[in-house]
Amino acid sequence: MSVEETIRKTVTENDVVLFMKGTKMMPQCGFSSRIAGVLNYMGVEFADVNVLADEQIRQGIKDYSDWPTIPQLYVKGEFVGGCDIVTEMTLSGELDQLFADQGIGFDKDAAEKIREANG
Amino acid sequence: MPITAREIEQLLRDAFPQGQVKVEGDDGAHFAAQVIDESFRGMNRVQQQRAVYAALKGKMDGSHGELHALALTTKAPD
């Protein structure tokens, strides 16, 4: 399977996927840590892919989305954005809306708490 | 060669001559940039930020990219 096929399979077989540096339990970059932290806090089930463990995936995911940085969040196979976009969407409530529209379970109260703390 | 906020700002000003560009950060690796440009109107955030990355001409690329961390804020003028 080519790298592109592997990535496509990963993002279609998992509703929410975060390509990140490190793992969701042990992120190794502040930007990756921020998105993983938001998803964990909101109780969203997601697959994490550690790009530091696979150089082909690390480059491949940038080619796949035409996006030069990591982390990258995918929901239902669609690229949502990197750290800044996901942060803005979290604070604006757009991320809640996206999860709700896509039938992804999340803790609305936790999302509200994030907004209260950063309002 | 580490990149400076001034160089990033110049690249962005070249790409968005009518836009408002602000770049902060002086440790040579971590920066925050804000670009407000009319061309962003009608684009979603992914499209806006792709345009900014394109202006930086590969400086974000790869594990040896000059620019490790750029926090980006993009929008069209109010």
Image (cartoon, rainbow, N blue to C red):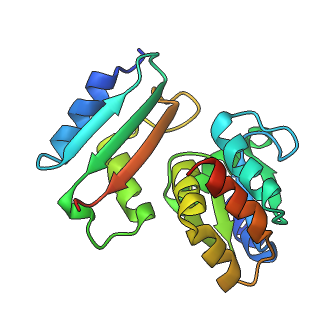
Residue drawn where x is 85% and y is 66% of the image: A45
**Horizontal relation, residue A86 to residue A23: left or right:** left
**Horizontal relation, residue A118 to residue A40: left or right:** left
The residue sitting at the left extreme is: B18
Measured as percent of width and height from the top left, residue A107 is found at: 80, 69
Residue drawn where x is 79% and y is 52% of the image: A49
| Image quarter (top left, top right, bottom left or bottom right) of the N terminus of chain B | top left
Residue drawn where x is 80% and y is 72% of the image: A14
Q: Is residue A2 visible?
A: no
Viewer-proximal residue among B25 and A94: A94
Eyeballing the image, is B50 above or below A102? above
Residue B39 falls in which quadrant of the image?
Answer: bottom left
Residue A77 falls in which quadrant of the image?
Answer: bottom right
Measured as percent of width and height from the top left, residue A32 is found at: 68, 43
The residue sitting at the right extreme is: A25
Measured as percent of width and height from the top left, residue B8 is found at: 31, 31
Eyeballing the image, is B19 above or below B23? below
Measured as percent of width and height from the top left, residue B47 is found at: 39, 64
Q: Is residue A79 visible?
A: yes
**Horizontal relation, residue B67 to residue A98: left or right:** left
How many marks can you see? 0
Residue drawn where x is 68% and y is 71% of the image: A75
Eyeballing the image, is B52 above or below B24? below
Viewer-proximal residue among A6 and B26: B26
Viewer-proximal residue among A69 and B5: B5
| Image quarter (top left, top right, bottom left or bottom right) of the C terminus of chain B | bottom left
Viewer-proximal residue among A61 and A84: A84
